Amino acid sequence: MRNIHIKNGHVIDPKNKIDAITDVFVSDGKILALGDAPASFKADETIDATGLIVCPGLVDLSARLREPGDEYKATLVSELHAAVAGGITSLSCPPDTDPVLDEPGLVEMLKHRTKQLKLAKVYPLGALTTQLKGQTLSEMSQLAAAGCVGFSQANIAINDTQVLWRAMQYAATFDFTLFLSAEEPFLAKGGVAHDGEVATRLGLKGIPSAAEALALASILRIAQETNATIHITRISTAESVEMIRDAKKQGLKVTCDVAANQLHLTEHDIGFFNSHCHLKPPLRTERDKTALCMGLKDGTIDAICSDHAPVDDDAKLVPFAQAEVGATGLELLLPLTLKWAEQNKVPLSSALSLITENSAAILSITAGDLTIGNPADICLFNADEYWEISTSTITSMGKNTPFLGLELAGKVKSTIALGDIVFTAQ
Amino acid sequence: MKNPQLNADGELTHLLSIEGLPKRNLVQILDTAESFIGVAEREVKKVPILKGKTVCNLFLENSTRTRTTFEIAAKRLSADVLSLNVATSSQSKGETILDTVDNLIAMNADMFVVRHNESGAAHFIASHVPKHIHVINAGDGRHSHPTQGLLDVFTIRKFKPELHNLRIAIIGDVLHSRVARSEIHALSTLGVPEIRVIAPKTLLPVDVEKLGVHVYHDINEGLKDVDVVMMLRLQNERMSGALLPSQQEYFKTYGLTQERLNLAKSDAIVLHPGPMNRGVEIESVVADGAQSVILPQVTYGIGVRMAVMAMLGGGKA
């Protein structure tokens, strides 16, 4: 492996509280030193990082890679290239592929294939119940042994609270983290947008905020009873922020994240039925957006995720309600995080912690920092350079995002994964 | 945000919804419709405005009345009319709606009249057709049914020309109704000062007040002193279940009877977009009574649809 010298960059490592112009030395796939070169160090490659931020490779909590099963939407190769183009070197993926990630063999295959690609590292979330049907617990211990870092139901709710209770009990036995989204399926049935002013005007079937509150209340209450460790993915309402704040105060082992899109968009962005804004959870009100931004700032929300869900063009070229849910996100995670930080006057280091050390801690993985001796996963970006979000600038096979045509600041210049330069901007 | 139905000069290029249409466009359509009403009374019921043009009725949801009136309107304008039925169309063979539209454009269709069960379908099609193609929304999901809204205000204007003095009540399933949404937008744009909606809470969408209406749950209270009563159709599948307990209960609590209508002004008129459920939302005595303008609505509907088609497809009207 090559020795890399990253010279003169603005190094920000939130976990180790480093925020200074300095040099980083990489050797043998690991972080060798910061500051002065170790005595015997001889660089095979020197990167001039003058004017760039040098930070830990980003860690994304929710990225759909679509393989296996939906390779026409995206593939492991395409999306892991997109990840490193977005500065992401570790990501976790939900189990709703086809077949569902509920067998150790599938997990091993996914781990093996992605490891060989030597791009971003993939940390699968196993299915919490067999086939995500919400009836039978999956073989969690064996799935964990195969490489799952937690368990999830993706977007599919468990209707039976007894099953949810048992799932949490069982997971708590082995200290597994459950990644749960909060949406009460009966209230949300058929809904495609926030149940509010815009849905009423456009005649779209709504998903009330109460659907999230009800599901979240059940999850939190059962977590309290079972002492399970839970992570709530992609909260979307002001009420959820309050509920999680209270749960944390009570000492529950709960963390949560918000999708980057939710920090910038509201129901009004649907405009005249823009199917790129057909997302799950739905875009909500201005008040919700503000509460999410504030909750992130005060630490109630622990991390930002890309909620990457690449969709093929045809699946969006239909009337709004029929359009497939989701937006491409891997390459927008950094710019949208920076945009939130700027709008809310959050220091860069604090903002980066939300997509590095915090998400790594939630996944319990060694990543998201520049600690000496840790794997050299590094992202170099220009925080002030604007780039246009377009079908030609997005690497992911999914070109679907509400931000198409807009310019965002935050351009990744180089990504290093396990000591190899895996992405360099053109 | 750019209104997708107006061109750079503020002229109508598609008719997709009433919302966002300036008053002058609405008035222009109504005034043009006025001039077409006479055509039906001539011996030769035709004008050559759309001669040589092909109007394609693309109905992806069942409809008899609306499709028929659009067909008649197009034929009276001398257009060639092609009516595609959902049951026999390639949509049921899995073709996407855009492919269907592209194929029809390749066959030189000039104008599409679209009905679809999803809100936003007409906007979607309009945003993907070439500039010279015009799209008329003939009903999309719960969103909009602009020609119905227009023919309703046309009818009201005929009988009650002083729109700015009217008190109007809309009764029934507002939640699922594209007609109600179109009526509300049309009436408020034209300056009607008081629009009421009367329905149980299960049939009203969230934040309906933000559309500029007053909400009544008691029909007797809501009908008091109104000039116009606009009924909405209650779909069969919504008559019993979690939205409403039964037809009978609905009729007892929200059905329009003569006794209730007497609470309105003595010269109040009654509209219904059809098809009616007699004995469910409206009593026959009222539907066929002296205050009913339900059949004139149908007649005017043709004139309004001719006006819209002529304005879109016939150059300057």
Image (cartoon, rainbow, N blue to C red):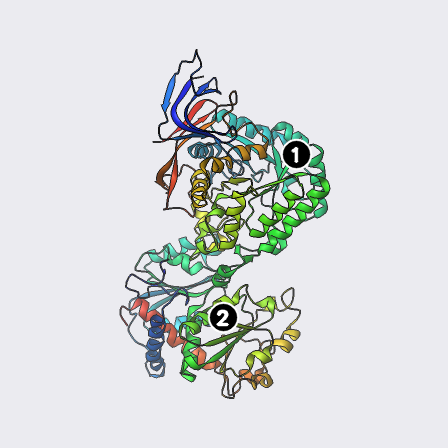
Can residue B87 be seen from the camera position used here?
no
> Please, what secondary structure does the residue beneath circle 2 have?
helix
> Please, what secondary structure does the residue beneath circle 1 have?
loop
Q: Is residue A160 above or below residue A195?
A: above
Q: Position of residue B55 (x, y in %)?
A: 35, 65
Would you name the residue on which mark 2 appears?
Answer: B180
Q: In the image, are marks 1 and 2 on the same chain? A: no
In front: label 1 or label 2: 1
Q: Chain of mark 2?
A: B
Q: Is residue A11 above or below residue B262?
A: above
- Quadrant location of residue B16? bottom left
Q: Could you tell me the amino acid type at mark 2?
A: Ala
Would you name the residue on which mark 1 appears?
Answer: A176
Left or right: A124, with B64 as reference point: right
Which residue shows up at 66% across the image and 49% down it?
Answer: A217
Q: How many other residues sit within 10 Å of disc 2, few (<14), some (14-19) or many (≥20)? A: many
Residue positioned most to the left: B316
**In front: A90, or B203?**
A90
Q: How many other residues sit within 10 Å of disc 1, few (<14), some (14-19) or many (≥20)? A: many
